[in-house]
Image (spheres, rainbow, N blue to C red):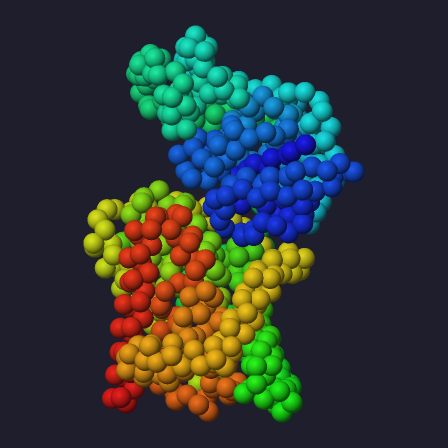
Amino acid sequence: MRFLLAGQPNSGKSTIFNAIAGYRAATANFPGSSVTYTLSRALIHGREVDVVDLPGMYSLTSVSPEAGEAVRYVAEEDWDLIINVVDASRLERSLELTLQLLQLERPMVVALNMMDEAERHGMTIDAEALGKKLGVPVVPTVGRRGQGLKDLFRTALQAAHGGSAAGTGCFDKEVKTAVAQVKDLLEGADFESRLPLTLVATKVLELDPYFREKVRQSAPQVENDIDSIVERLQEIHGWSADQVVSGCRHAMAHTIWDEIGQLGRPKVGWRERVDRLLLHPWSGGPLMVLILSAVFYTVFGVGQILEAPLVGWFDGIQAVLEGRFPLETLAGALLSGIFLGVAGGLTIVLPYLLPFLIALAVLEDSGYLPRMAYILDNLMHRIGLHGKSVLPLILGYGCTVPAIMATRILESKRDRRITAALASFIPCSARTIVVYGLVAAYLGPLWALGIYFLNLLVIMVIGRVLSRFLKGRSPGLILEIPNLALPTAKTMIAKTWLSLKEFLVIAWPVLVVSSIVLGLLEYFGAGDFINAALTPLTVWTLGLPAAVGMTLIFGVLRKELTLVMLVQAMGTNHLDQVLTTEQLVVFTLFVVFYVPCAATIAAMARELGWKDTAWISGLTVVVALALSVAGRMVFSVV
């Protein structure tokens, strides 16, 4: 048995999915943060059920990538029931998607989620009356607190065995006639579909790309007749056909809300007062800088507190190991590689990664990220980009791979290419570890902040240049601002663990294996050969010790490797004793800006193609070299 979770962005759909299936989907209090579906198996009242979390979508019309993925899944995959998660505090708007889902004529349950927010807005909703009006069960829930979820899935199991849900009629006479005419044409052409022909006919009238292509492939002989029906409908109403159909749904949703809901006096609390400050033209920008600075200093402070005792402890163990197993022996080289890989993850990466992931989760779940997007919208347009480009760029501070994937939410290919290029320059959590572990730890937090500000400046300049070369205009930003929320401890822990697990399961083993490989290369003398071959880059251009050559090669696999393997290459955790201030800064600049990791390159090739991936990767190398050389020149003058 398979259940689908479908709903508009920020309706709490993924929160319900995680509550029932375990934390599998990375949720964020930011509309449009998911463009792919997530599948998990859950035990619901003694039954094994596959639960699928579809991308958030405002409509079943497949003009957007997330809706296109959802439509494809609904139309082509096997499933038994759909759970429509709606935001009760925005019920009237949410019902427009519900009315479309009802046309699937399949078992369905409506989860009336965020009931606490609806009450805070002064709304009273008669769930029983809503269920009668829609013809399907309606269950009130508060997903982030787990309230009502048992009833929801118990009702879903019952509904899955209870037959089909009847479609709700929401069209005026002319639209009903047009839908019936298109349906007759499709039946006459023996058009086959796993979906009800009434829904297909409606979507064809709306000029939906997915369904129009299906008709073009299976029944091309009726295309001209359908176009004539569309033209007549537009002549009668004076609007485009998709506006006519969506207008009917909007009117029906408004009618339903009037019958089952009441709006009273909203409660004005701390959220509204804080929101006025966060979104105010004068206070929003300074508060954003203050918040991000607080995050930076908190991560740095916690990281230093955790790092100092760990480094001291592992230094003692390393001295004992080297005394018993000299590095000149094969056993010593192997043990040193294993030890430095494990110690590097514990002493260098984790102390800064863990607080960074927690801070990022707070920003996501509190709802502050879309407020940042709103504040930065004007800036994004100044560099020639859509305001929605802020989402992939912000995601890039966690990991560049989902940032590249998130460019799918941008309608323009030009914007997707530019945003993907800029996202590859964003310091992800791995590159952030290098900034914290080298510059902040040895030179102080102000030096690290300087690198972040330089990074932002470079991104703005590159964005401006690319927008000049790649011609086109970006539309304005239409963004739903979700309610501010206090992140729950359970969600915070689960989300942090989901991100941290990737490091523990994927990155850390790579660190250890790479450290062993580096140790063996040095033992057999191959390391000197590779480092010598890279001397023109490392020594002549960057002014770094020849020993860092291989660390830059391994850094293409995972950026954390550059820091851990730098410790191994230099033979000490106290890098400030073997590297000058200039070398620490130049090494960090090059690592932060040069070629993204292998996973990012693969994601970029999948989203944009190898041609765009090649020039973006080449651009990162050119920028990294230019900034590193410029850094050397500044130090030589100073």
Q: Say whether residue 593 is visible.
A: yes
Q: Is residue 92 left or right of residue 419?
A: right
Q: Residue 477: percent from the left, percent from the top?
A: 36, 47
- In the displayed structure, 40 sits above or below 418; it is above
- In the displayed structure, 456 sits above or below 166; it is below
Q: Is residue 60 left or right of residue 307?
A: left
Q: Residue 260: percent from the left, percent from the top?
A: 62, 28
Q: Nearer the viewer, residue 595 or 108?
A: 595
Residue at 51 percent of width and 41 percent of height: 56
Residue at 42 percent of width and 10 percent of height: 189
Residue at 43 percent of width and 57 percent of height: 600
- In the displayed structure, 581 sits above or below 27; it is below
Q: Say whether residue 315 is visible.
A: no
Residue at 57 percent of width and 44 percent of height: 38
Q: Examine the image and state in which quarter residue 316 appears.
A: bottom right
From the image, which quarter does the C terminus lie in?
bottom left
Q: Residue furthest right?
A: 46
From the image, which quarter does the N terminus lie in?
top right
Q: Nearer the viewer, residue 535 or 131?
A: 535
Q: Is residue 468 left or right of residue 154?
A: left
Q: Residue 6: percent from the left, percent from the top?
A: 56, 36
Q: How many marks are shown on the rendered structure?
A: 0
Q: Residue 109: percent from the left, percent from the top?
A: 65, 30
Q: Nearer the viewer, residue 493 or 540?
A: 540
